[in-house]
Amino acid sequence: HNGLCYGIFLNNSTKTYFDFASSNDRFVQFTVTDGPMDYYFIHRNSVLEIIQDYSFLTGTLPMPPKWILGYQQCRYSYYPETEVIRIAKTFREKRIPADVIYLDIHHMDQYRVFTWHKEYFSKAKQMIAKLRELGFRVIVILDPGIKIDPGYLPYEEGLANNYFVKYPDGTNYSGTVWPGWCHFPDFSNPAVRKWWGEWIKFYVDSGVEGFWTDMNEISLMGAQPPDMLCYDHEGEQATGKQVRNLYGMLMAKSTIEGAEKLMKKRSFVVTRAGFSGVQRYASVWTGDNVASDEHMLVGVKLVNSLGISGVAFSGPDIGGFAGEKHKSLFPRWLSVGCFTPFLRGHSEINSQSSEPWAFGEENTETSRTYITFRYKALPYIYSLFYHNHAYGIPIVQSLAIEFPHEPEVYRHVYEEQYTFGPFIMVCPCPSRQNAYPIFIPGDDLDWYDLHTEKQVIEKEFWATSYPSILPLFIRGGAILPLQSLVMSVFEPCDRVLYLHVWNGKRNTKFEYYEDDGESFGYKDGKFYKRWIKFDPNEKSIKLEKVVGEGFDTTFDKVSILLHKFVELKKVLVNGKEFEVQKTKVKLLEIEVEVQEFLFENTREEIV
């Protein structure tokens, strides 16, 4: 209203109700059932600044292991070991990049956490070592329920040390989950978190590098845990009213802290449940969904909303967890997913699998095209993760963040559009529509079709949206650092940074970032970052002097690729003359002509 904006952060973990003008047309209201009315009023000049302030209150994401930015393949469930290896080999044979395979609940013995199935995964450590040779990391599912099973060591230890959630009379609470009757660790107790973290050694010793914390609301079979349950709550004692909404985040905290202490490098957790601040410990996926266009588009809204809420690292189950997929849905959903932070294909038991090759050769090629772009764009994407870590900037942004006062942003037909970083606009649309309406925000129409490079000439128009073509647009002045194609994130590239720059009307800049992608050295300044700036008036591109020590760049050379510029014969790089060559590049499915020149990289300023 009145061209202004503000934010409210309600810091209360009890049951909360938000009424976004559904019962009246004047105001938004929020209500809590218990606890303090503790909330922050955040006033800034822009929505982005409000999100940044909120992020610095609740935390930003740490730099993740770089391999988690690649494609991840999941199913409920891949087993036995030979099937897991077959899936990994098929990715490599079909030249589809991928980095992660998940093991769902069938990896466990009787669904008991911290066990391997005696038949399906009798040689789990050797299997994981083979996957590592193929360039894959393994993530296993963790459910909080500890099976009531005398002789089962996690149960015996939890019982002996009073580590489980209790009724008011001191009896351990029991509920049914996958293993049957279970007790539940009280993650609000620091001693319990330490104990759970130590049990992560069971998986780390086998080579597991990431964890998927599920059913952690707490979720039960056909029931809800009662509010009367008693928790330690950091020594202050509380009931389920205060702690249940915190439970998933505290499980994620326990898991990541235990894993990284054991591994002595970055690990990864993806969680189904969380609370404000969960981004410090885990990524969030948007839960079980259905194979439909409606759920694909709802997933876009959820990821955009999580980004506004400080949870920058999120994504849906690509293709839909439940239900049968029609052959054009998966490649469309995957093409959208390649422009979200968390990229995982998943499907449930007794349904069609969701590997990229499962829907016919034409759709396999479409999936390969978009995953290929994702891997070439890793220098850009990893820099976006740094922007969130350092500044609290969402990786994907609803158009309402940058353009909150343009009424078209809120029209139903445009509400799924978003930006991926500062320069790429993604326009998700149903998989069986051949054309879809597009809205171009801003007042200068300084955008190009990323497929054809044609400049946009209208604010609103219809774009082609065949299953193989997701409407994508690139902003004038865009600076897009890319690399050569690799099949997994840590496979060596050709050591050339391909810096694509689009002509535009305004000055633009991009903070480029690298580190080793695995260690915690970045916290001690062991990184490589520099501002890259484009000035259309001075006709200049500047790579500022590198900041950071103890880590050198992956790239020995820089290739500048100019899009939509007037024809050039020669350019000056730090006063030295270089010839400009015309060449063709294929970012997605269409080749376009650009102008290119190549020079040696250096830590000093390059103009």
Image (cartoon, helix red, strand yellow):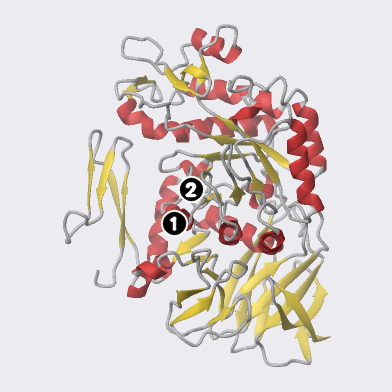
Q: Which mark is residue 77?
A: none
Q: Is residue 529 visible?
A: no
Residue 262 location in percent, x, y? 67, 29
Q: Quadrant of the N terminus?
A: bottom left
Q: Which residue is mark 2?
A: 290
Rendered residue at 38%/9% (across/down): 171
Q: Which residue is mark 1?
A: 294
Q: Is residue 167 left or right of residue 21?
A: right
Element on which disc 1 rests: helix
Up the image or down, 436 lies above or below 20; here it is below
Residue 256 location in percent, x, y? 58, 35
Up the image or down, 69 lies above or below 37; here it is below
Instruction: For the residues labelled 2 and 1, say whether their Cβ atoms are less than 8 Å apart.
Output: yes
Rendered residue at 45%/38% (across/down): 273
Q: Is residue 271 left or right of residue 352?
A: left
Element on which disc 2 rests: loop
Which amino acid type is marked by label 1? Answer: Glu
Using the image as rendered, state which of residue 105 and residue 167 is in the foreground: 105
Q: Is residue 256 visible?
A: yes
Where on the picture, by quarter, is residue 151? top right
Residue 12 location in percent, x, y? 31, 39
**Within 10 angstroms of label 2, few (less than 14), some, or many (20 or more) residues?**
some
**Within 10 angstroms of label 1, few (less than 14), some, or many (20 or more) residues?**
few
